[in-house]
């Protein structure tokens, strides 16, 4: 159903009530104070540092190489005193360091070698007057027997640093740094100013989001406005992650600030602009795409269009990221770019070698194992990028509550503009943090504390949403809301997640056609290894959510607690049984097929991989027509899958075709049994025993499952006994289903 919410004014602050201008002034003052505190706590401390700070060595060097080798820019590395600085690389097998230095001094008038030692790289740093610019550019040709390359600026001591492009990350920030160096020369202050500008942009977007959340309240006052606005300067003053990352030329502050801009645009109902901003965040660093699922969900709930949700939440951001790689594709070729991107996916799911202190996902929220960016000469930390728990942990917790309240309102069809705001502002820090949880589960256990700047920036609107959340909580009834969330949405969300995860795992494990044998797919395959922690955790969490939701969904309709408990126990048994079958991970798909059964859905369930979960679910269908349609479709799907198996490998009998025929007879009896006025759980248990004899121990624990357990034990004997077991199962199924109310529970 499409949202009928009114559109906001396209520009400017939304002024509400007589005090609107005063409220806007309060938030504007809070932003100015936050900007001043941010400057004092970070950039002001780094004004005298005329050298690299922390990981600037990689990104500035990569920007220089991108400018040279990709963009074709001719950088002139002017310094503050008017001279030029370069790094000269030489061939150590053709000449020594002394010979290379002498050759450079002889070829370039006025050049002298700087006092910088290189050990890993075969290089030396030089300084020359501006008049020697042309001679330096021709140096590799003038001394080709010895000198191999001349790189603008003073490069760090790292092997092959003159060709490093930092393709582990997308290129947007390298373009920005290259433009700054092209315009301003070799000036560390200049290449750090864009980080400060990005931080101020993010703070401005977070301030606007906080103001929007305030204006959506019904009970507004100056005190509440001051309280909500105070979050902004408090975070700037007390959160080292924000102030420190606004000081250095690194990627995370760009991704964090553009994510905050995407959030502000989403709250202003500018969906397309929010999607582009999110894509730019991902173009700064792939972690900037972590809020993409939240954007897709918000667009879906706000517009009622799944197509727009997929386009704006997924397609457009990815296209924006892809567009930033176009200069690389033009310079290196599309295949090279695809291989580098795929390699980066594997790199991001692999732990780094021992080095700086790393933390865990929980440590990101609690500010543990801080990353020091720069030490003073006496060894004291000057800049440390670590999140204040009062910002990150509180922002994620409050955000989870706000997003839950918004989803509960939507589930109960109580939806308004304030719920969209609560969902977006509250879910942003939580979604960003969950992205790092996924990376950690996938195998990258070297998370650094400066990553938390993304959570810090997004936590500001989340904390500012507390007044609106309190107002909404006054009207929220917890029990109906929780029941609605559990029974309406949880099964579908978890089933979809499980289906996607299983599809990828099956393809990569050989169960389905594998990816083409092209080097570009190798890192992707290793990153999505079905045996990884991420796959196992995802499937386990999905199964738990599906069967918990299924139990709640069917239990709430029962007339007595005893009946409800029995039915919930049977659903739990279905979940346990499904994990004993070869098709275990597809159990959520079976649940989807049985929640609203039709012929097509049940056919899909049978093709997906027959298992006890699907059969037990059939017994709970309301009405004999539903049971009949489900049984017919499930039978055809199962027989089609079984025929494929029979053609590819022998079944546990001497002759596969008789076994297929006997199973077909059993399925025919099942169809007849399910057309009876009442369904029987004994029928389901019997068929479950036939499909999966290894389920005998679990069947024996189920109410009324003793006969089915014996049947499973007989079937597990294999050989010719299997055919007899199938025939016996057919007889048991037909007789049990036709006996009204015998051996089973009938749902009213």
Image (tube, helix red, strand yellow):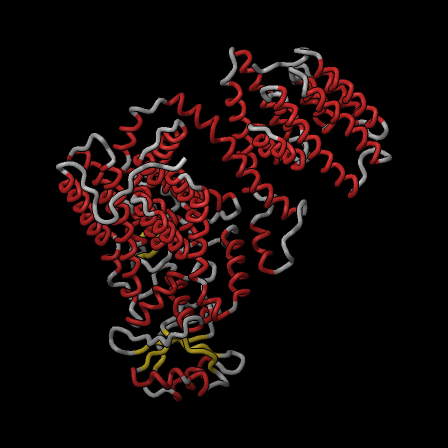
- Is any part of residue 120 visible from this angle? no
- Is any part of residue 219 visible from this angle? yes
Residue at 72 percent across and 37 percent down: it is 640
Q: Quadrant of residue 390?
A: top left
Placement of 597 over or under 735, stated as above or below: below
Q: How many labels does the image show?
A: 0
Residue at 18 percent across and 49 percent down: it is 32
Side of 344 relative to 531 (left or right): left
Farthest residue toward the front? 625
Side of 431 relative to 265 (left or right): right
Q: Quadrant of residue 212?
A: top left
Which x, y percent locates residue 563?
Answer: 55, 13
Placement of 367 over or under 613, stated as above or below: below
Which x, y percent locates residue 443?
Answer: 53, 47
User: On the rendered image, what quadrant is the N terminus found in?
Assistant: top left
Which x, y percent locates residue 596?
Answer: 56, 28
Residue at 40 percent across and 44 percent down: it is 295
User: On the rendered image, what quadrant is the C terminus found in?
Assistant: top right
Placement of 121 over or under 411, stated as above or below: below
Which x, y percent locates residue 625?
Answer: 62, 22
| Nearer to me, 381 or 294 | 294
Placement of 57 over or under 211, stated as above or below: below
| Nearer to me, 619 or 105 | 619
């Amino acid at each position: 159903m499409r949202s009928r919410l009114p559109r906001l004014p396209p520009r400017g602050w939304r002024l509400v009530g007589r005090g609107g201008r005063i409220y806007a002034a309060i938030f504007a003052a809070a932003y100015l104070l936050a900007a001043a505190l941010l400057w004092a706590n970070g950039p002001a401390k780094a004004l005298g540092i005329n050298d690299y700070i922390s990981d600037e060595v990689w990104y500035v060097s990569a920007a220089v190489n991108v400018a040279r080798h990709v963009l074709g820019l001719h950088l002139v590395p002017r310094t503050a005193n008017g001279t030029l600085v370069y790094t000269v690389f030489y061939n150590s097998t053709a000449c020594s360091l002394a010979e290379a230095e002498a050759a450079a001094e002889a070829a370039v008038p006025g050049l002298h070698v700087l006092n910088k030692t290189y050990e890993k790289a075969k290089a030396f740093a030089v300084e020359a007057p501006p008049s020697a610019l042309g001679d330096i550019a021709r140096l590799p040709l003038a001394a080709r027997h010895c000198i191999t390359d001349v790189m603008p600026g003073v490069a760090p001591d790292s092997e092959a640093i003159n060709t490093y492009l930092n393709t582990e990350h997308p290129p947007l920030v390298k373009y920005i740094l290259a433009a700054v160096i092209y315009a301003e020369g070799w000036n560390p202050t200049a290449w750090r100013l864009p980080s400060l500008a990005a931080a101020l942009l993010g703070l401005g977007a977070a301030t606007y989001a906080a103001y929007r959340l305030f204006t959506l309240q019904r009970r507004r006052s100056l005190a509440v406005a001051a309280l909500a606005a105070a979050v902004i300067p408090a975070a700037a003053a007390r959160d080292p992650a924000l102030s420190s990352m606004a000081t250095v030329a690194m990627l995370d502050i760009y991704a964090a600030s553009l994510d905050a801009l995407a959030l502000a645009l989403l709250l202003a109902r500018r969906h397309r602009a929010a999607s582009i901003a999110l894509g730019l965040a991902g173009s700064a660093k792939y972690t900037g795409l972590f809020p993409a699922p939240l954007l897709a969900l918000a667009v879906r709930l706000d517009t009622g269009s799944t197509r727009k949700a997929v386009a704006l939440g997924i397609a457009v951001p990815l296209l924006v990221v892809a567009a930033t790689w176009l200069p690389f594709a033009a310079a290196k070729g599309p295949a090279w770019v695809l291989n580098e991107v795929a390699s980066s996916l594997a790199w991001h799911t692999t732990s780094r070698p021992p080095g700086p202190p790393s933390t865990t996902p929980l440590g990101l929220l609690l500010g543990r194992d801080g990353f020091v960016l720069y030490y003073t000469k006496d060894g004291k930390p000057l800049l440390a990028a670590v999140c204040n728990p009062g910002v990150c942990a509180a922002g994620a917790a409050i955000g989870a509550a706000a997003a839950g309240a918004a989803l509960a309102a939507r589930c109960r069809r109580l939806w308004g503009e304030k719920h969209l705001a609560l969902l977006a502002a509250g879910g942003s820090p939580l979604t960003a943090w969950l992205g790092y949880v996924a990376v950690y589960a996938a195998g990258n256990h070297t998370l650094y504390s400066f990553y938390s700047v993304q959570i810090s920036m997004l936590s500001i609107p989340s904390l500012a949403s507390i007044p609106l959340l309190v107002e909404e909580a006054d009207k929220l009834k917890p029990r109906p809301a929780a029941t609605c969330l559990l029974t309406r949405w949880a099964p579908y969300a978890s089933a979809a997640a499980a289906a996607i995860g299983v599809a990828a795992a099956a393809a990569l494990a050989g169960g389905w056609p594998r990816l083409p044998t092209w080097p570009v797919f190798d890192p992707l395959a290793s990153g999505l290894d079905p045996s990884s922690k991420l796959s196992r955790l995802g499937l386990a969490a999905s199964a738990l959510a599906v069967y918990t939701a299924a139990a709640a969904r069917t239990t709430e309709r029962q007339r007595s607690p005893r009946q409800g408990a029995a039915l919930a126990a049977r659903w739990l048994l279905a979940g346990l049984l499904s994990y004993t079958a070869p098709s275990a991970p597809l159990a959520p798909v079976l649940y989807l097929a049985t929640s609203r059964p039709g012929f097509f859905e049940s056919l899909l369930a049978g093709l997906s991989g027959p298992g006890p979960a699907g059969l037990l679910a059939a017994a709970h269908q309301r009405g004999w027509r539903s049971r009949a349609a489900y049984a017919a479709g499930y039978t055809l799907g199962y027989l089609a899958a079984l025929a494929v198996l029979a053609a590819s490998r022998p079944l546990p009998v001497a002759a596969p075709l008789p076994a297929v025929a006997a199973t077909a007879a059993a399925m025919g009896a099942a169809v007849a049994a399910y057309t009876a006025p009442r369904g029987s759980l004994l029928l389901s248990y019997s068929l479950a025993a036939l499909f999966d004899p290894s389920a005998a121990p679990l069947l024996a624990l189920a109410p009324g499952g003793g006969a089915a357990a014996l049947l499973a034990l007989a079937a597990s004997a294999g050989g010719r006994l299997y055919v007899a077991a199938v025939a016996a199962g057919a007889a048991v199924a037909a007789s049990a289903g036709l006996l009204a109310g015998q051996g089973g529970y009938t749902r009213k």
